[in-house]
Image: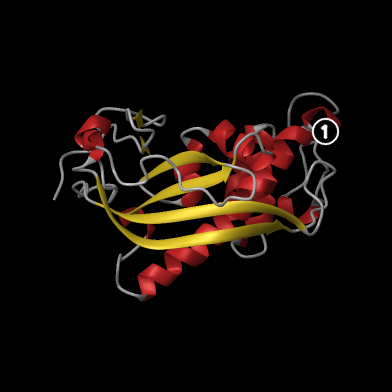
Amino acid sequence: VLHAALEALHLSTAPLLPFLAEEIHEHWPGAQAAPGPAPPPPPPFEREWAAPPLAWSDPLLARRWGLASAVRDEAYRQLHAVQLDKAIKGPAEALLEVGAVEGGELHAALSSLGAELNDLLGVSGTRLHALREGGTDEPAELDAAAVSGAVIGAVIGRFDGHVTVAAGSGSGEPAEGEAHALRLVLRSAAAPKCARCWRHVAPEAEGHGFDGVLLEDGWRLRGHAGCDGHD
């Protein structure tokens, strides 16, 4: 899969960076003529896009990412709004509380992402909570708990509504017009900012890698492995 992804990236950059693409092709595994009758593969400018193997098809995964992408789009709009209000300089300075209907497809899709939800939304931490049907209830402990009081800052934005998932070409993607209740509560990050990766990292997340750290009150913070110190 990684090989196919790199090959697609190679083909997509060839029209823009032809000399780089040609150099990559010269060093690509199998590009040199091998002994025997099999010719080397043609350069990227002479190849066509190939469909991925059917064995790679995963409708459930495609649907979950389609739902998560709809949340990402709405989150980006809200983050952009608070940036315009000068509440934060960028998404890395924010933490995001995400509410979806308990037992619903959207909640299940977001839960399945785990630590990837932080990277999808581009924020330093997230907390997922369940809403009742209709999305009218307040999540328990909306204010930061004592365990993360030095990490979670003030509320700087809020969204209560629905996300509508656009139609996609994949068989596993949601249908057009499919709406899901969503609540977003944006908070400022109170933890120090790393001078190297620019993430606001709580002491609890020090030394943790990709999976980050899950606090007792449900906040999942981005990891901070391999960086040196804070501002």
Residue at (78% x, 46% y) in the render: 173
Residue 84: where, in percent of width, then height? 38, 75
Q: Secondary structure at mark 1?
A: loop
Q: Identify the residue under disc 1.
A: 53
Regarding residue 39, the answer to whether it shows in the image is: yes
Residue 8: where, in percent of width, then height? 69, 47
Q: Is residue 22 above or below residue 203?
A: below
The quarter of the picture where residue 53 lies is top right
Could you tell me the amino acid type at mark 1?
Pro
- 97 horizontally vs 41: left or right: left
Image quadrant occupied by the N terminus: top right
Residue at (25% x, 42% y) in the render: 201
Query: Furthest residue to the bottom?
Result: 84
Q: Nearer the viewer, residue 55 or 42?
A: 55
Q: Residues within 10 Å of mark 1 (few under 14, many from 20)?
A: few
Residue 105: where, in percent of width, then height? 69, 39
Query: Furthest residue to the top?
Result: 36
Q: How many marks?
A: 1
- 70 horizontally vs 49: left or right: left
Residue at (37% x, 70% y) in the render: 83
Q: Nearer the viewer, residue 229 or 103?
A: 103
Residue 63: where, in percent of width, then height? 73, 41
Residue at (63% x, 54% y) in the render: 70
Regarding residue 22, the answer to whether it shows in the image is: no
Q: Nearer the viewer, residue 39 or 84?
A: 84
Q: Is residue 102 above or below residue 190?
A: above
